[in-house]
Image (cartoon, grey):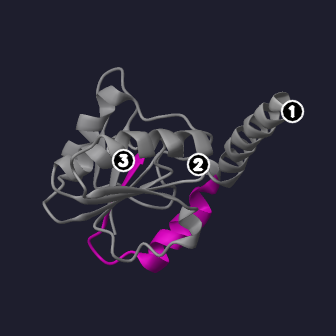
Amino acid sequence: MVIYLLAAIAFAFLATFAYAGWQAAPWFPTRSSDIGRLLKLADVKTGQKFYDLGCGDGRIIMAAAKQGAVAEGFEISLLPYLMAQVRLAFCVNTKAAVSYNNFWNRNLSDADIVYFFLMPKIYPKLRSKLEKELKPGTKVISYAWPMEGWQPTAIDRSEGKLPLYLYSR
């Protein structure tokens, strides 16, 4: 009986990984050494609303919250979501939250900053969503790949690192 329970749990984790990969991207975290670059490029101010689309283990939203942002991440893969919840349980900053939710179903109109590290295959659909929902002046930061059809405000191409693209809507 225990073996069936363990198999069901393993299947649930694998199924959510597959679903996340199909929806936007498999879980592949932003490099820890790039979080500081990201936050510097974002120029996070106290009270700003910061969204991380596909937030994984929550490291970025916690770092943004430490800089004063009200940070929320969305994750649909079960293991990274649970890891983020454990991290948040030990975080004294309550301005960070992770939702087990698909960002496609969330309205992002209150965002000041939106960050993502997703597969470029979904960028046309994402671009459409962001253009419809984001207010003027919202910062959008893409890790690794540019958003086709948008002109970046800045690009951080640090030596030996994946690029960060900053856009202003």
Q: Does 93 appear above or below 161?
A: below
Q: Does 105 appear above or below 71?
A: below
Q: Classify mark 3: residues with Cα within 10 Å, few (<14), some (14-19) or many (20+).
A: many
Q: Which residues are magenta?
A: 122-142
Q: Classify mark 2: residues with Cα within 10 Å, few (<14), some (14-19) or many (20+).
A: some
Residue position marked by numbered label 3 in the rendering: 165
The residue type indicated by label 3 comes to: Tyr
| Residue lying furthest top | 160
- Find out whether the residues at labels 3 and 2 contact each other: C-beta distance under 8 Å: no
Q: Classify mark 1: residues with Cα within 10 Å, few (<14), some (14-19) or many (20+).
A: few
Which mark is first along the chain, 1 or 2?
Answer: 1
Residue position marked by numbered label 2 in the rendering: 120
The residue type indicated by label 1 comes to: Met
Residue located at (50% from left, 61% from top): 149
For the C terminus, the quadrant is bottom left
Q: In the shown orientation, is residue 163 left or right of residue 156?
A: right
Circle 2 SS class:
helix
Residue 120: x and y in percent read 59, 48
| Residue lying furthest left | 46
Q: In the shown orientation, is residue 71 left or right of residue 25?
A: left
For the N terminus, the quadrant is top right
The total number of labels drawn is 3
Look at discs 2 and 1 and give the one toward the viewer.
1
Residue located at (80% from left, 39% from top): 8
Which numbered disc covers residue 158? none
Residue located at (51% from left, 43% from top): 82
Which numbered disc covers residue 1? 1
